[in-house]
Image (cartoon, rainbow, N blue to C red):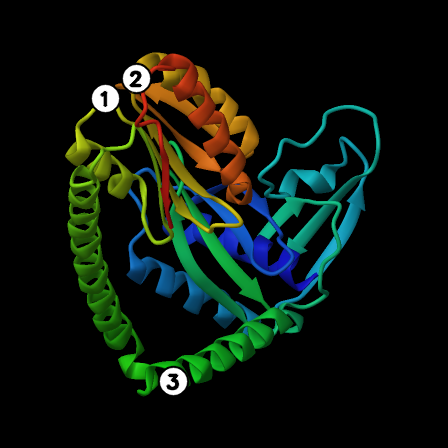
Amino acid sequence: MQQHSGQHLITAIAEDQFNLHTTSWNLGEEVSTIELDAPSGIKPEDINRLESTVNEKVRQCVPVNARLYQPGSEELNGVRTRMKIPDGEGDTIRVVTIEGVDSNLCCGTHVSNLSHIQVIKLLYIEKGKQGKANLFFIAGNRVFKYLSKVVDREKKMTTLLKCGPEEHAMMAEKLNQSLRLANKNALTVLRDLAVAEAKLFTLLEPRPKFYSYHRREGNNEFMTIFDNEVGDREVVLFLTTGDEKGAGQFLLSGPESVVVDCGPKVCELIEGKGFFKHGRYLGKANKLSTKAKAEELIKNACKEAQPQDKNMTLTSVA
């Protein structure tokens, strides 16, 4: 009841004093929303004024009542409603009135006095579609529950960040910048590692025709750099990254006939999905624990493609 009556009050004040018409609303389990027609947007100071005005009405203990009318009743002529009043005979019409503020057709339950709402907090505005703005709010007991959660979260953040609440945002941004720098450095190292590992492969004598390599912390870029550095389409490369016994990524390159034939079969063995592009078969794997079976399949395909090649050795590095 607190949320529904709060919605009626916010809608009425928003329309009467700010020319913001409600186009829809939703009473959520924790936070409710009102969609407002606001093609020019809503200024933060208007939200503050709206919140102040609705809470002033709550403090004024304005009565709320619901009355039933028959269609065509003369009493309906004085009712200001946001919905068209049915004409002619039919069911009774229920009108919920906040005295001196608003009258609206409504079949829902409401408080009998605005003071029962206790308090209304307008949380924030999100831009909607086609000139609309979504206003998020809470009322009554939900305000106190929300405040309790905020305080608990604030205490945890104070412990984690080792600073007071007024410095949380600054410290979080500082940590975020440090993380971005660390990630950038890690990416550079990973790229250099891909180049170095590929160089080691090119030094192998004799160079194997099939080479399998796994790097747990690698990614698609790592595998692509490795493949580019090798630059030999006569060699079949089977590169994988991620959890050795779980999910990850893979790249298969080499002679197109082998790659096109083995790619889908490898996907099936490692329970993944992939695609062929620019001479490579790339994809995601859900079961790298079966990688050995995929290696055996590729090795056999290589032997069939080049049965006379004596350097058809399987080299696998994890």
Disc 2 crowd, CA 10 A, few/some/many (<14, 14-19, 20+): some
Quadrant that contains the N terminus: bottom right
Mark 2 and mark 3 residues within 8 Å of each other at the beta carbon: no
Q: Residues within 10 Å of mark 1 (few under 14, many from 20)?
A: some
Badge 3 marks a residue whose secondary structure is helix
Residue 118 in the image, given as x and y percentages of width and height: 60, 74
- Residue 195 percent location from the top left of the image: 16, 45
Q: Position of residue 307 (x, y in %)?
A: 38, 15
Along the viewing direction, whichever of 197 and 250 lies nearer the viewer: 197
* Residue found at x 38% / y 13%: 305
Residue at image x 52%, y 77%? Answer: 147
Query: Circle 3 sits on which residue?
Result: 158
Q: Nearer the viewer, residue 37 or 95?
A: 37
Q: Amino acid at mark 3?
A: Thr
Q: Alpha-carbon neighbours of circle 3 within 10 Å: few (<14), some, or many (≥20)? A: some
- Residue 209 visible in the picture: yes
Q: Are marks 2 and 1 in contact (CB under 8 Å)?
A: yes
Q: Residue at x 33, y 87 (%)?
A: 162
Which residue position is annotated with label 1?
233
Q: For the point 20% across and 37% down, which residue is it?
A: 205
